[in-house]
Image (cartoon, rainbow, N blue to C red):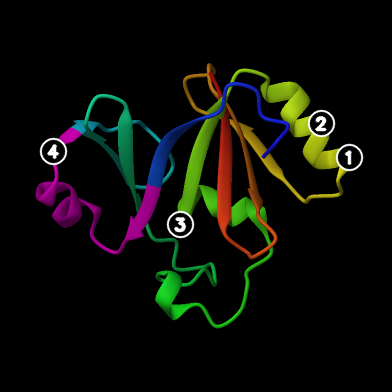
Amino acid sequence: MAAAAGAFLNHVSRESSDVRRLADFYKEVENPKFEFGVIWLKLGSSLFLHLIERDPKTKLPEGPWSATSAVADPKNLPRGHHVCFSVSNFDSFVQTLKEKGIETHERTQPNGKTKQVFFFDPDGNGLEVAST
């Protein structure tokens, strides 16, 4: 991610068939309104764990240990396992991804403030980069 200026880890995201049970294990900090169940947990001063309700229609693996093949559609990543970094140069970062031929899925959070891009690294790991 050499093209990312001022990048820092924003959050780690894990999906679950029971986000409430998993949230009870942690301390709940926020429940944003998405079209699916999601709970944001604050772990320390600046790291979040996002618990996301599993989408039964996708073929994403239930976890890294269960993957049998890479799932190459980044539009499924908002509800799948991914790591998120925040960058100060979001638009130029996305342009760099496109110039490299990396397939992406872009969207804006419901609050209209945070832009997001989802994509896979060369080994098939899900990534999100968000605007700061």
Estimate the spatial distance between the alpha carbons at disc 4 and disc 2, rounded to whole Å: 37 Å
Earlier in the chain: of badge 3 and badge 2, it is 3
Between 13 and 53, the one lying in front of the other is 13
Dividing the picture into quarters, in which one does residue 64 lie? bottom left
Q: Which residues are magenta?
A: 13-28
Against 15, residue 11 (above or below) is: above
Circles 3 and 2: CB atoms closer than 8 Å: no
Give residue 83's mark. Answer: none
User: Badge 1 is on which residue?
Assistant: 99
Which amino acid is tagged 3? Answer: His
Provide residue 73's location: percent of width, then percent of height.
68, 60
Q: Earlier in the sequence, mark 3 or mark 1?
A: 3
- Mark 2 highlights which residue? 95
At 40% from the left and 71% from the top, the residue drawn is 62
Disc 2 to disc 1: CB gap under 8 Å: yes
Disc 3: which residue = 81
